[in-house]
Structure formats: C-alpha cells, structure tokens
C-alpha cells in the first residue's frame, strides 16, 4: 500500500496527527470496498470488513523495526552516523523547534513503555 511507505519518511509532513492518518486510511479502504458517504456505513463496520490493522500501529511497528536495524549496524556505517548526528553551531529560528525523526521514535517508545 502506498500509505505504508509514509512510515519510512522521518516526519509525516502531510498529516499532523494519528487521527488524520487513520481517517485518510479509512477513506481509502472505503473506496476499495466501493462505499460512498451516502451509504452511511459506520467506520467500525469498514474496519471489520477489511480486517486490516490500524495504520498508526503499522507505522509505529515499522518505525521501531527500522530503529532496531539501525542500532544493530556497525558504528562506521553512514546510516548509523546520520542517526547519531547532531547539528551544532547553527543559528536556530524563533518559535517552536522543527520536528525531527527522533520525536516520533521517542513517542513510540514511550507508548510501549521503554522510555
């Protein structure tokens, strides 16, 4: 599925919350089943018909699997160095800090009780 590719992107740019991701995923599932909004079928029924797990769980699982893969790499690999890289001596903009790839990972680890 095309949306599952999004879990490999460090930050989900197009969606802001898990609810928005799940809403888009549900919309695509309804389209696959040929359900229109006029049919007035509940979301729970659509989830039961497709038998698919929520996309938020799939994304968390794959993100943590990717982290485990990176952590098992040797220290001289570029991928592992990029994960541990911090930018210093750079003037930051005012306002809220930009999201980075570590924020969703920390949140996922907190959800499963590891952090």
Image: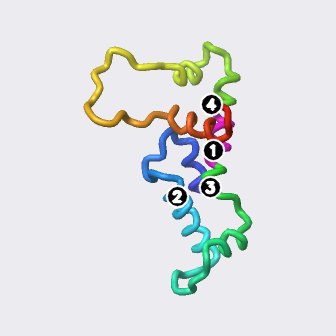
Q: Residue furthest left?
A: 94
Return the residue at label 2: 19
Q: Which residues are magenta?
A: 59-66
Secondary structure of the residue carrying numbered label 3: helix
Q: x%, y% of residue 41?
A: 61, 81
Separation of residues labelled 1 and 3 (CA atoms): 9 Å
Secondary structure of the residue carrying numbered label 2: helix
Separation of residues labelled 3 and 4 (CA atoms): 23 Å
Specify which label sits upstream in the sequence, 2 or 4: 2
Q: x%, y% of residue 99?
A: 42, 37
Specify which label sits upstream in the sequence, 1 or 3: 3
Specify which label sits upstream in the sequence, 1 or 4: 1
Specify which label sits upstream in the sequence, 3 or 4: 3
Q: Callout 4: few (<14), some (14-19), or many (20+) C-alpha neighbours within 10 Å?
A: few
Q: Callout 1: few (<14), some (14-19), or many (20+) C-alpha neighbours within 10 Å?
A: some
Q: Quadrant of residue 32?
A: bottom right
Return the residue at label 1: 60
- With 71 as the anchor, is 85 left or right in this view? left
Q: x%, y% of residue 21?
A: 52, 57
Please give the count of numbered marks on the rendered protein: 4
Residue 115, disc: 4
- With 49 as the anchor, is 55 left or right in this view? left
Return the residue at label 3: 55
Name which residue lies at 62% across and 55% down.
Answer: 55
Separation of residues labelled 2 and 4 (CA atoms): 23 Å
Separation of residues labelled 2 and 3 (CA atoms): 10 Å
Q: Quadrant of residue 100?
A: top left
Question: Which one is in front in this view, the residue at disc 2 or the one at disc 4?
Answer: 4
């Amino acid at each position: 599925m095309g949306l599952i590719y999004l879990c490999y992107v460090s930050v989900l740019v197009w969606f802001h919350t898990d609810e928005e991701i799940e809403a888009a995923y549900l919309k695509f599932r309804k389209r696959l089943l040929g359900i229109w909004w006029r049919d007035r079928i509940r979301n729970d029924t659509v989830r039961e018909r497709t038998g698919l797990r929520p996309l938020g769980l799939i994304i968390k699982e794959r993100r943590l699997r990717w982290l485990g893969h990176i952590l098992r790499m040797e220290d001289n690999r570029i991928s592992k160095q990029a994960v541990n890289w911090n930018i210093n001596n750079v003037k930051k903009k005012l306002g809220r800090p930009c999201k980075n790839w570590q924020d969703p990972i920390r949140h996922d680890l907190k959800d499963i009780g590891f952090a």
